[in-house]
Image: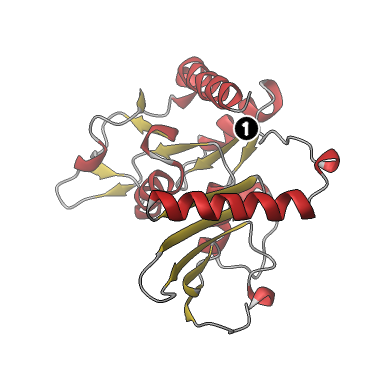
Amino acid sequence: MVIKKLKERSGVVHDQLGWGDPMPLEKIEDCASAELVAASYNGGYWGVLNLKVSDWGCEVSIDAGPEEIERVGAAVKDVLTAAVDSSQLAATQRPFKVFIGHGSDSQWKYLYEMFSKVHGFNVEAFESSERAGIHTLFVVDKMIRSSSVALVVMTGEDQMADGSMRARENVVHEIGYCQGALGIDRTIILLEDGISEPSNIAGLTQIRFAKNSLIDAQDRILNTLNLHKQAQDFSEI
């Protein structure tokens, strides 16, 4: 077995670990999740094994012929049966968590207070706690990947040469980051009227609100969050 890629969710990638090479566990011990892609060339190409491990479970996929998949599955079952005490296993439901992405406009603070303290959601934004000495992107990456859904607030903060207003570049970046990590359907864009809209967000999940009136969109946002929470709860039954 040759390890082709070991990806840490903190952003560090280790490549080409050959047969017999030690696994650098000390480099990933503080990661919330990791991805391992391995290929076997035992006397010829066999297939590819993808393993994704996180705090909430393990996802395994095998790209190989049906006979190889069946053989590997039987071997894994035998190993687990012998090594795991099934009486100690308990199902763990992943908590529903909401990430809020935003610029410097303080309207996002209303969402944080409302949905965390009034509606009881687990809500997190970059400013939620002290993170001195840690690179911003690493922090945001971990927060997004541990969330169930993202609310990204696009308010007009940067004025263009033609007089039009657009959201901060970090907000546009976070939209793409959330879409890649959580999925397009779980990235909810809160779009203020009158700002330039990136062409690649047309047709995506959007909740529009009047300038400086994000508070007026709270019912629509709450309904959307409840629908996503219900979908997650149903999927884990």
Please report the residue visible at 56 percent of the width from the left and 30 percent of the height from the top.
111
Examine the rendered structure and indicate whether residue 75 appears above or below residue 1: above
From this viewpoint, which residue is outermost toward the left?
Answer: 162
Nearer to us in this view, 130 or 47 = 47
Nearer to us in this view, 44 or 21 = 44
Label 1 neighbourhood size at 10 Å, few (<14), some (14-19), many (20+)? some
* Residue 126 shows in the view: no
Query: In the rendered image, which quarter is residue 203 located in?
Result: top left
Residue 159 at x, y percent in the picture: 26, 48
Q: Quadrant of the C terminus?
A: top right
Residue 37 at x, y percent in the picture: 46, 64
Q: Is residue 4 left or right of residue 83?
A: left
Residue 139 at x, y percent in the picture: 58, 59
Nearer to us in this view, 75 or 36 = 75
Q: Is residue 183 left or right of residue 100?
A: left
Please report the residue visible at 78 percent of the width from the left and 55 percent of the height from the top.
83
Residue 76 at x, y percent in the picture: 62, 54
Please report the residue visible at 44 percent of the width from the left and 75 percent of the height from the top.
42
* Residue 215 shows in the view: yes
Please report the residue visible at 53 percent of the width from the left and 19 percent of the height from the top.
222
Tell me how the rendering is colored: secondary structure
Q: Is residue 90 left or right of residue 145?
A: right
Q: How many marks?
A: 1
Please tell me whether mark 1 sits on a helix, a strand or a loop: loop
Q: Amino acid at mark 1?
A: Phe
Q: Is residue 3 left or right of residue 31?
A: left
Q: Which residue is mark 1?
A: 96
Examine the rendered structure and indicate whether residue 108 appears above or below residue 62: above
Nearer to us in this view, 86 or 50 = 86
